[in-house]
Amino acid sequence: MSTKSKYKENNFSPENLLNSNYKDQNNLNEDERINIKHLLKRIRDKRKQDKKNSISIGFVFLSFFLIFFYVQN
């Protein structure tokens, strides 16, 4: 058996951070930003549509319930 450490080397040390492409990874080009904005807009629009559908379904069920209650009395 070897006496080597079973842990991986420290990839977050300051020496490795200076050598990495850390800054390049955080910079998105304009096309990627536009794509992300477009996806966020689609998510927002989908949630609005789901909310409208939920309100519509709730209104229909409430209407049926009130009509049923009115007919029973």
Image (tube, rainbow, N blue to C red):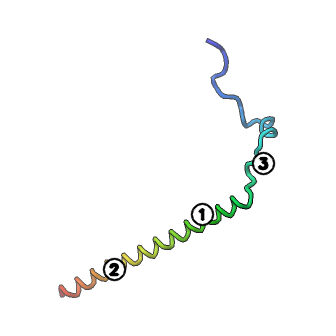
Instruction: Name the residue tied to disc 3.
Output: 23
Residue occupying image coordinates x 81% and y 40%: 18
Task: Say which element carries label 3.
Answer: helix
Residue type at mark 2 is Val
Horizontally, residue 68 falls left or right of residue 41, namely left
Residue type at mark 1 is Leu
User: Distance from label 2 to label 1 (Cα)?
Assistant: 32 Å
Does label 2 or label 1 sit earlier along the sequence?
A: 1
Q: Quadrant of the C terminus?
A: bottom left
Pinpoint residue 57: horizontal percent, then vertical percent: 36, 76
Instruction: Name the residue tied to disc 2.
Output: 60
Tell me whether circle 2 and circle 3 mark residues in contact (CB < 8 Å): no
Task: Say which element carries label 2.
Answer: helix
User: Distance from label 2 to label 3 (Cα)?
Assistant: 54 Å
Pinpoint residue 3: horizontal percent, then vertical percent: 66, 15
Instruction: Name the residue tied to disc 1.
Output: 39
Q: From what the image shows, is residue 6 above or below residue 29?
A: above
Residue type at mark 3 is Lys
Residue occupying image coordinates x 67% and y 18%: 4
Residue occupying image coordinates x 78% and y 48%: 23
Residue occupying image coordinates x 27% and y 80%: 65
Pinpoint residue 71: horizontal percent, then vertical percent: 20, 87
Q: Residue furthest left?
A: 72
